[in-house]
Image: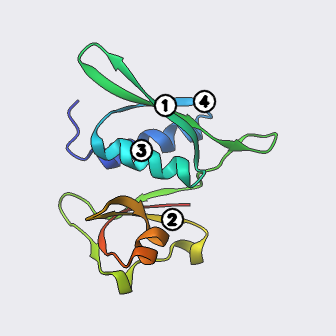
Amino acid sequence: MAANDTIADMLTRIRNAGLARHQTTDIPSTKMTRSIAKVLQAEGFIESYSEAEEGVKRKLVVVLKYKGKNRRPLITALKRVSKPGLRVYSNRKELPRVLGGIGIAIISTSSGIMTDRDARRQGLGGEVLCYVW
């Protein structure tokens, strides 16, 4: 299955693994998915991620984080904003705040992939990839 939208594919895999209470999930590795995993780890939404090679294909192994003794996923929701059919851009003044700052928006800027908070701090706008909370 060749997914054109690697970001939506990644978000869906993380969402499904969380709902099924899996410890890890495999995601096809691209520069974009690695960058998003790096941001999710820095923000504390996932435990860690590592790269594994399966023949020619490279994959990211993402270790999910849970809270409490009933193991509720730390990631409540992932929402894709900018899609291949409809790109959503935002300048630095109009960067979205997710749930009043509880969640994060992942932005693709000229300086790489970062959270809305970092983009605001650096005075950058860009493509709004997704919301995570």
Q: Quarter of the image for the C terminus: give it.
A: bottom right
Q: Residue at x 56, y 66 (%)?
A: 103
Of marks 2 and 3, which one's residue comes earlier in the chain? 3
Q: Which mark is residue 23?
A: 4
Q: Which comes sooner in the sequence, label 3 or label 4? A: 3
Q: Nearer the viewer, residue 12 or 110?
A: 110
Between the residue at mark 2 and the residue at mark 3, the CA separation in whole angstroms equals 17 Å
Q: CA distance from mark 2 to mark 1?
A: 21 Å
What's the residue type where badge 4 is placed? Answer: Gln
> Are discs 3 and 4 less than 8 Å apart at CB?
no
Q: CA distance from mark 1 to mark 4?
A: 7 Å
Q: Which residue is mark 2?
A: 104
| Mark 3 Cα-neighbour bin, 10 Å: few <14, some 14–19, many ≥20 | some
- Up/down of 116 relative to 1, above or below: below
Q: Of the residues under marks 2 and 4, which one precedes in the sequence? A: 4
| Mark 1 Cα-neighbour bin, 10 Å: few <14, some 14–19, many ≥20 | some
Q: Report the coloring of the rendering.
A: rainbow
| Residue topped by disc 1 | 25
Q: Residues within 10 Å of mark 2 (few under 14, many from 20)?
A: many
Q: Amino acid at mark 2?
A: Ile
Task: Tell me if label 1 and label 4 are in contact, CB under 8 Å.
Answer: no
Amino acid under label 1? Thr
The secondary structure type at the circle numbered 4 is loop
- Residue to which mark 3 is pinned: 12
Q: Secondary structure at mark 2?
A: strand
Residue 91 at x, y = what percent? 30, 81
